[in-house]
Image (cartoon, grey):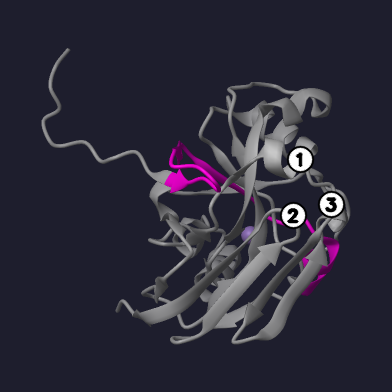
Amino acid sequence: MSAYTIQPSKIPAFPITGSDELFPIRRVFCVGRNYSEHAREMGHDPDREPPFFFMKPADAVVSADGVINYPPLTQELHHEVELVVAIGKDGFNLSPEVALEHVWGYGVGVDLTRRDLQAQAKKMGRPWDWAKGFDEAAPCSALTPVRATGHPEAGWIWLRVNGVERQAGDLADQIWAVNEVISHASKSVKLKAGDLIFTGTPAGVGSLKVGDSVQAGIDGIGKLAFTVGPRLD
Ligand code: MN
């Protein structure tokens, strides 16, 4: 086998609750709209249209236990707390009935969004990548295996900024349940062990500013906390 011409990057890997092992991250899929109240606050009809997806780079997933810098190019950095699904087994064209067999575990993540860039992209018919896929755009809690969490069908999901509640909802209010989200994603691509799926956010998304303290959690799954660091630009 030929040698690499430059040193290859390390595979992004993530801490696991109660273990010294790491979860290797392959790709990050995110569901665009998955709670009715959030669909309405973004100006959309929350009818049960098929879920749509966008992606973040695997190394945008960072541990949410310190400082997350305020990214460049935006005046409107938004928080979106989400249930994160970690895929542990490859699968293609999965039915909702078998989809959960492919879940390794769960976590809590924040889909950080440069909302002003996203609004511009929507208006101009451009892709969302620059709004969603920047460095540190996906702070996440440690991941917890299914054997400890089960498969959550309900549970309070919340986010506070400086102690004030911004987002609150229940996993039971997801338009598409986890097994359905996995099934849909697996019809588009071969899901692989190591893939993460951010499953959408409840209502109450809003702006973060430098110095804000963010706490978020999902009952039975985990919690995270980080501070918004200085602007990078
Ligand atoms: Mn989101």
Q: Is residue 98 above or below residue 156?
A: above
- Residue 84: say if magenta: no
Measured in 3D between alpha carbons, the distance from the residue under mark 3 to the one under mark 1, in whole angstroms, is: 20 Å
Measure the alpha-carbon separation of dots 2 and 3: 20 Å
Rendering quarter of residue 204: bottom right
- Which of the two labelled residues, at mark 2 and mark 3, occupies the earlier sequence position? 3
Per the image, label 3 sits on a secondary structure element best described as loop
Q: On screen, 171 above or below 85?
A: below
Return the residue at label 3. 175
Location of residue 83 by image quarter: bottom right
Which residue is at 79% across, 46% downward? 152
Q: Determine contact: label 3, label 1, CB under 8 Å.
A: no
Measured as percent of width and height from the top left, residue 24 is found at 44, 37
**Three-letter residue code for mark 3:** Ile
Could you tell me if residue 44 is visible in this image?
no
Pointer 2 with pointer 1, Cβ within 8 A: yes
Q: Is residue 97 above or below residue 160?
A: above
Q: Which residue is mark 1?
A: 150
- In this picture, residue 27 sits left or right of residue 199: left
Magenta range: 14-41
121 left or right, relative to 67: right
What amino acid is at disc 2?
Gly
Say whether residue 218 is left or right of residue 128.
right
Residue 220, position as x, y percentages in the image: 74, 54
Q: Nearer the viewer, residue 55 or 212?
A: 212
> Which residue: 74% across, 45% down?
51
Q: Amino acid at mark 1?
A: Gly
Between 149 and 166, the one nearer to me in the picture: 149
